[in-house]
Image: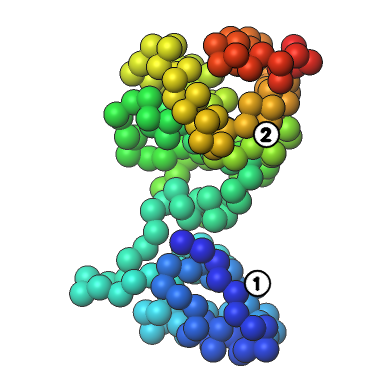
Amino acid sequence: MSTTTVPRADSPGKFLARLPVGSYVHVDQLPGTSSAAKNAASRAATRGDLVGLRRGLYYKGKRTRYGVLTPPAEDVALEVLGRKGVGPTGVWAAHALDLTTQLPAVPELVTSGPIPTGVRGVLVHKRNNVARRDLNYAEIAVLEVLRDWNYTTETTWDGVVAAVRERVQGRQVRPDKLAAAAAGERKPHVRARLRDLLAALDLAAPFAGAR
């Protein structure tokens, strides 16, 4: 799923017609005047070409005999929140790292930025650590699992280490970025567990200054 752009010379209607299925539409990013953009999106939604997700945000989904498909609630939340410094928490984080087979009915995410309104089907929490804004989804998942891994996972500490090692090797997780962000965590046990984790991965050096 993506937010696709087309030449800005297009009218809002032509812009929308040319967008591929699976695209998010931010009204404030459409070409033309604000009123023209709003009207074009509204008409497209009335025709069934777009699905309204929240104020100013639509989705161009695939048409089926049962209606237009909509994206998962977590995907919508990530489109609104952004992809940097946002990730899963609780059991949702453990599931993202394949540390549990449980899949909560309602996704839970964390952000270091403001919590938006009008995002349905997802619980969003705030973490007061601006250093998290440099982290990706998987890295946020690691920090959140370290908060309470013994309650949210179905594995041992060695299982947590193995899961993170796999993602470090796959370049999904950057130990130096984790260490920098952990230095701003308010819970001492998270910093301590990350030191233990990096030591188990033979990567203690990136955490040298984060105490």
Q: Which mark's residue is nearer the viewer, 1 or 2?
A: 2
Residue 141 seen in the current view: no
Q: Residue at x 67, y 89 (%)?
A: 9
In this view, the residue farthest toward the right is 209
- Mark 2, residue position: 132
Q: Secondary structure at mark 1?
A: helix
- Mark 1, residue position: 28
In the foreground, 143 or 111: 143
Vertical placement of residue 138 versus 157, above or below: below
Position in image of residue 201 (x %, y %): 56, 16
Say which label, 1 or 2, has the lower sequence index: 1
In the foreground, 5 or 107: 5
In the foreground, 143 or 69: 143
Report how far apart the C-alphas of labels 1 and 2 lie in the structure: 27 Å
Left or right of 27? Residue 45 is: left
Query: What amino acid does circle 1 point to?
Result: Asp
Q: Secondary structure at mark 2?
A: helix
Which quadrant is home to the C terminus?
top right
Residue 201 seen in the current view: yes
Position in image of residue 65 (x %, y %): 20, 74
Vertical placement of residue 154 versus 78, above or below: above
Q: Residue at x 43, y 67 (%)?
A: 22
Left or right of 162? Residue 32 is: right
Query: What amino acid does circle 2 point to?
Result: Arg
Vertical placement of residue 51 versus 194, above or below: below
Neighbor class of circle 1 (other Cα within 10 Å; few <14, some 14-19, many 20+) is few
